Image (tube, helix red, strand yellow):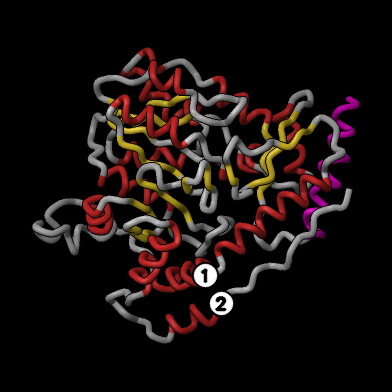
């Protein structure tokens, strides 16, 4: 079988350094200049939505989106336990209550039976997370939200470029994205949200800047908000990368194909396939670990130089983290740990990739994975 080729790193329409140098030449500029506004226009056009709001991080995007969607103190927000702390922190910052929902190990999608059990009279929103770029069924999500009268705010931080059944990740509800280093669309640090609703965009834009300028008809700084504007040099970086975004997505997909092919003979490991109708962005190379002590194996690989979600970053279900267990006493029905999420994390090897990972790097990862899996299986 002929191995897939890894294409060269996509070049920008203009070198990234030139874009940033041009911005720096005009600084200091207390107004921030036009760069964020231009980026927002281009983002909305690229993703086919009406409005985009640029902010300083993916976490800031979630915070602004939840506030714009009317989430207030005491409201409950359904959120998968299969996520990182940064997804849940904005819920808590608004003094709302995260209610952790399980995921289906067979699909990585939300367990909607579990979600239905956890809906109460205080539930206001559902916040799906497209972890590793994998997107659940958008029709099932929209149907569940409509049936229960819930707002949808998507954590699509890792899912820029993923499409399922013709729908881009982050466009089912209010979509929130990160542009931190390592993301496919990156600016070093930063984020943005996408929405079809003008009122949500106006609220989010005011929220990121201490409510100044405010939405139409409101007074400047008439409510407490935040300072999460996207700095002009970072907006310029994001705009330059947006020009080559389709090529960056295809490059990441090619990296995943290359690595999975190179590691195809590793015993006890099986590549995870995208879901039906899913055009996955390939954020991380994903393999199911069918070896004894699978989480220990992921930790072992990290120590051998193969970065991965559980082994390198210690990713565990959010409902098992001490800072969130105190919320569960408000409703005893929510106290059961999400076992599906735990199984997914314990048995998934999610290899962390960046666009600069060359064939040499990927070959090294594959060699280590294959060698160590062979040794582990024989123990």
The structure residue drawn at horizontal position 55% and vertical position 63%, both measured from the top left corner, is: 245
Seen from this angle, which residue lies furthest bottom? 25
Label 1 neighbourhood size at 10 Å, few (<14), some (14-19), many (20+)? some
Q: Look at the image and give the residue range highlighted in magenta.
A: 359-379
Tell me: 30 left or right of 185. Answer: left
Residue 204 point in image, percent of width and height? 27, 53
Residue 129 placement (x, y as % from top left): 47, 38
Q: In which quarter of the image is residue 126?
A: top left
Q: Horizontal and vertical percent for residue 282?
A: 63, 48
Q: Is residue 111 above or below residue 160?
A: above
Kind of element beneath mark 1: helix
Q: Please give the label number shown on residue 13.
A: 2
Q: Position of residue 373 (x, y in %)?
A: 84, 35
* Up/down of 327 relative to 175, above or below: above
* Residue ID for mark 1: 243
Q: In which quarter of the image is residue 227?
A: bottom left
- Rendered residue at 23%/58% (across/down): 206
Q: Earlier in the sequence, mark 1 or mark 2?
A: 2
Q: Is residue 117 above or below residue 52?
A: above
- Asked whether residue 321 appears in the rendered view, the answer is no
* Cα separation between marks 1 and 2: 7 Å
Vertical relation: 172 (above or below) 204: above
**50 part of magenta stretch:** no
User: Relative to residue 244, is residue 236 drawn left or right?
Assistant: left
């Amino acid at each position: 079988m002929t191995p897939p080729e890894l294409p060269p790193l996509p070049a920008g329409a203009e070198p990234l350094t030139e874009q940033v140098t041009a911005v720096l030449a005009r600084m200091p500029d207390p107004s921030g200049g036009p760069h964020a506004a231009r980026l927002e226009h281009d983002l909305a056009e690229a993703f086919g939505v009406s409005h985009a709001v640029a902010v300083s991080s993916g976490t800031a995007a979630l915070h602004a989106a939840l506030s714009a969607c009317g989430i207030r103190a005491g409201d409950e927000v359904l959120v998968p336990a299969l996520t990182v702390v940064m997804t849940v922190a904005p819920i808590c910052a608004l003094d709302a209550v995260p209610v952790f929902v399980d995921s289906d190990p067979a699909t990585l999608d939300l367990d909607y039976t579990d979600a239905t059990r956890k809906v109460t009279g205080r539930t206001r929103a559902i916040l799906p997370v497209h972890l590793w770029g994998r997107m659940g069924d958008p029709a099932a999500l929209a149907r569940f939200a409509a049936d229960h009268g819930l707002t949808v705010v998507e954590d699509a931080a890792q899912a820029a470029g993923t499409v399922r059944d013709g729908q881009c990740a982050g466009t089912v509800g209010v979509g929130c994205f990160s542009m931190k280093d390592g993301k496919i669309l990156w600016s070093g640090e930063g984020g943005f949200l996408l929405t079809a609703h003008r009122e949500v965009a106006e609220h989010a834009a005011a929220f990121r800047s201490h409510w100044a300028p405010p939405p139409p008809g409101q007074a400047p700084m008439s409510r407490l908000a935040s300072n999460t504007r996207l700095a002009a040099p970072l907006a310029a970086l994001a705009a330059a990368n947006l020009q080559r975004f389709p090529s960056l997505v295809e490059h990441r997909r090619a990296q995943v194909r290359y690595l999975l092919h190179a590691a195809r003979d590793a015993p006890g490991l099986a590549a995870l396939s995208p879901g039906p109708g899913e055009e996955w962005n390939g954020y991380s190379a994903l393999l199911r670990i069918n070896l004894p002590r699978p989480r220990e194996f992921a930790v072992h690989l990290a120590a051998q130089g193969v970065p991965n979600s559980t082994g390198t970053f210690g990713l565990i279900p959010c409902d098992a983290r001490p800072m969130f267990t105190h919320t569960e006493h408000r409703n005893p029905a929510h106290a059961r740990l999400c076992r599906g999420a735990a199984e997914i994390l314990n048995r998934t090897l999610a290899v962390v990739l960046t666009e600069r990972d060359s064939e040499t790097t990927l070959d090294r990862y594959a060699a280590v994975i294959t060698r160590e899996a062979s040794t582990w299986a024989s123990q």
